[in-house]
Image (tube, rainbow, N blue to C red):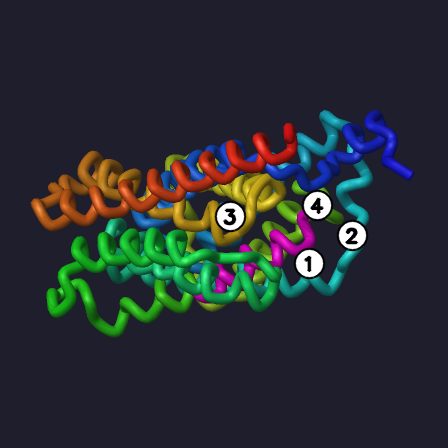
Amino acid sequence: MAADPATVAKSGFSARVEAPGRGIACMIGGGLLLTLNDAVVKWLSGDLPLGEILLLRGLGALTVIALVLLWRRDVGALRVRFPWAQVVRASLMVAGTFLFVSGLRRMPLADCISLAFIGPIFVTALAPVFLGEQVGWRRWLAVLVGFAGVVVMLRPGGDSLNWAALLPVSAALTGAFRDLLTRRISASESTLTTLLYSTLGVTLAGGLTAPLGWQTPAIGDLGLLALAGLFLCGAHFLHIETFRFAEAALVTPFKYVSLLWGVVIGFLLWADVPDRWTVAGACLVIGSGLFILHRERRRAAVARVANAD
């Protein structure tokens, strides 16, 4: 029996809908918000301990989620259909967040984001195993071209590639498993439910480590942390929605667009000027994403013609 639309709307639950264009838009928009969040965290990381940042930022994000739940009168979001899946996803979020933020403290913003873009390679390799998705050679080639663009920008052998590079790479691996799990539970768990419990997990983890080092933040820092919480909340909402609309192996390469956001924000805040290698790599990144979008549109057009016949 189909669910009543009014009940579905009230509960915040949205059934999985195959809408690749919408999924890609959510991935790109979420990437922008997440990069803004990363920039705020990097800005504050020189003054505040990591656990304190994650705790206060998480409290800001949880406040936003609570206000949305109260506005919608949505107690259904507190109910979990797959509790162990939510625990595992939250644990992956905790591990990935600590690894990536630790990388941000030691590396330039664009470099850290670039290294994290090995994630699409992990997702593309693991999606057939964990989700049974079909990944053709053209999509594989596009993903590899996009990653080649990242390698061009990093210029292996330069000073940016040191032991700290393992932090965002490890974060990318945990993020790949998180994305695959999100896709698997997206047909049964509401976006708000997944967002709530993952954010709660990271916040609690930050609270547990906060006593190891605490510094009273200034009023301005509290405002930035609240803003980071808002960015983080919006980013993860869009990313969770992404996997409700499209296959993981399809939308994940569009994370590469976040590199462009990182370059722009790095220039505006830290006067980091992209050189010709960065521009060349960015062209490869954008080209790979556009090729995947073109292939998906062609597949959709062929499917529509076949159904019409």
**Residue under the image location 35 percent in, 63 percent down:** 168
Q: Are marks 1 and 2 in contact (CB under 8 Å)?
A: yes
For the N terminus, give its image quadrant. Answer: top right
Q: Amino acid at mark 1?
A: Gln
Q: Which mark is residue 86?
A: 1
Residue at mark 2: 80
Q: Are marks 4 and 2 in contact (CB under 8 Å)?
A: yes
Dot 2 lies on which element?
Answer: loop
Q: Are marks 4 and 3 in contact (CB under 8 Å)?
A: no
Tell me how far mark 4 sits from mark 2, CA to CA: 7 Å
Magenta residues, as a range? 173-186
Tag nearer the camera, 1 or 3: 1
Tell me how far mark 1 sits from mark 3, CA to CA: 22 Å
**Residue under the image location 72 percent in, 33 percent down:** 69
Q: Magenta-highlighted stretch: main secondary structure?
A: helix
Tell me how far mark 1 sits from mark 2, CA to CA: 8 Å
Residue at mark 4: 193
Residue at mark 3: 56
Q: Amino acid at mark 2?
A: Val
Dot 4 lies on which element?
Answer: helix
**Residue under the image location 17 percent in, 63 percent down:** 160
Q: Earlier in the sequence, mark 3 or mark 2?
A: 3
| Vertical relation: 138 (above or below) 98 | above
Tag nearer the camera, 4 or 3: 4
| Vertical relation: 221 (above or below) 165 | above
Q: Is residue 113 visible?
A: yes
| Vertical relation: 184 (above or below) 65 | below
Q: Earlier in the sequence, mark 4 or mark 1?
A: 1
